[in-house]
């Protein structure tokens, strides 16, 4: 699998328009609201014209592990991450919570094809 370049999510660029803040504010990711909204109705509602956080640049993300969210982002950003037996359960939980259908499907497909699970 490709190696993740965290600079993609940690430094500002012209496409990123929101900072997600995790935990005690020492973990931050710069991302594009539109990309999150395309993949998640939760984020679509959060960033809609009628939402409270629409114009806020720093959005606190509670009860989500920073590394897990990076894995999730890698699945929706252009082809960066392959799901592994180790990451699939965490990604399924996040995808279900954020209603990210494409990540749910990728995770389910991984489980179907994986030989590391006994059902």
Image (spheres, helix red, strand yellow):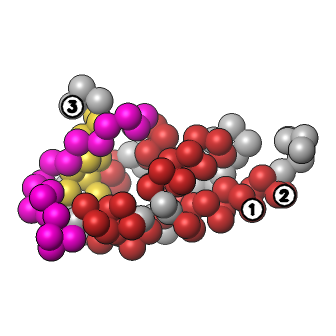
Q: Which residues are magenta?
A: 48-66
Q: Which residue is mark 3?
A: 25
Q: Dot 2, how many residues are within 10 Å of its Cα: few (below 14), some (14-19), or many (20+)?
A: few
Which tag, 3 or 2, sits closer to the chain's start? 3
User: Quadrant of residue 77 in the image?
Assistant: bottom left
- The x and y percentages for residue 26 are 24, 29
Pinpoint residue 98: horizontal percent, then vertical percent.
44, 55
Residue most extreme to the left: 55
- Residue at (48%, 60%) from the top-left corner? 99
Around disc 3, counting alpha carbons within 10 Å, would you say few (fewer than 14), some (14 to 19), or many (20 or more)?
few
Rendered image: mark on residue 79: none
> Dot 1 corresponds to which residue?
109
Task: Give the Cα distance between marks 2 and 1.
Answer: 6 Å
SS of the residue under disc 3: loop
Measured in 3D between alpha carbons, the distance from the residue under mark 3 to the one under mark 1, in whole angstroms, is: 34 Å
Left or right: 67 in relation to 46: right
Q: Are marks 2 and 1 in contact (CB under 8 Å)?
A: yes
- State yes or no: residue 63 in magenta: yes
Asked if one can make out residue 94 in the rendered structure from this viewpoint, the answer is yes
Q: From the viewer's perspective, is residue 70 above or below residue 36?
A: above
Which numbered circle lies on residue 113?
Answer: 2
Q: Is residue 98 magenta?
A: no
Which is more toward the observer, 62 or 21?
62
Q: For numbered disc 1, what is the local secondary structure?
A: helix
Circles 3, 1 touching at the beta carbon (< 8 Å):
no
- Judged from the image, the secondary structure of the residue bearing numbered disc 2 is helix
Magenta span: helix, strand or loop, mainly?
A: loop
Tell whether 99 sits left or right of 57.
right
In the image, what residue occupies the spot 83% across and 51% down?
Answer: 114
Disc 3 to disc 2, C-alpha distance: 38 Å
Where is residue 115 drawn, in percent x and y?
A: 89, 47
């Amino acid at each position: 699998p490709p190696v993740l370049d965290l600079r993609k999510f940690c430094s500002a660029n012209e496409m990123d328009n929101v900072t997600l803040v995790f935990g005690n504010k020492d973990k931050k990711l710069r991302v594009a609201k539109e990309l999150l909204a395309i993949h998640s109705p939760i984020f679509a509602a959060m960033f809609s014209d009628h939402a409270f956080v629409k114009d806020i640049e720093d959005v606190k993300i509670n009860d989500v592990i920073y590394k897990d969210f990076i894995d999730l982002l890698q699945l929706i950003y252009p082809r960066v991450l392959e799901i592994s037996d180790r990451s699939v359960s965490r990604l399924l939980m996040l995808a279900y919570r954020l209603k990210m259908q494409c990540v749910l499907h990728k995770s389910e497909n991984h489980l179907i094809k994986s030989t590391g699970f006994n059902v």
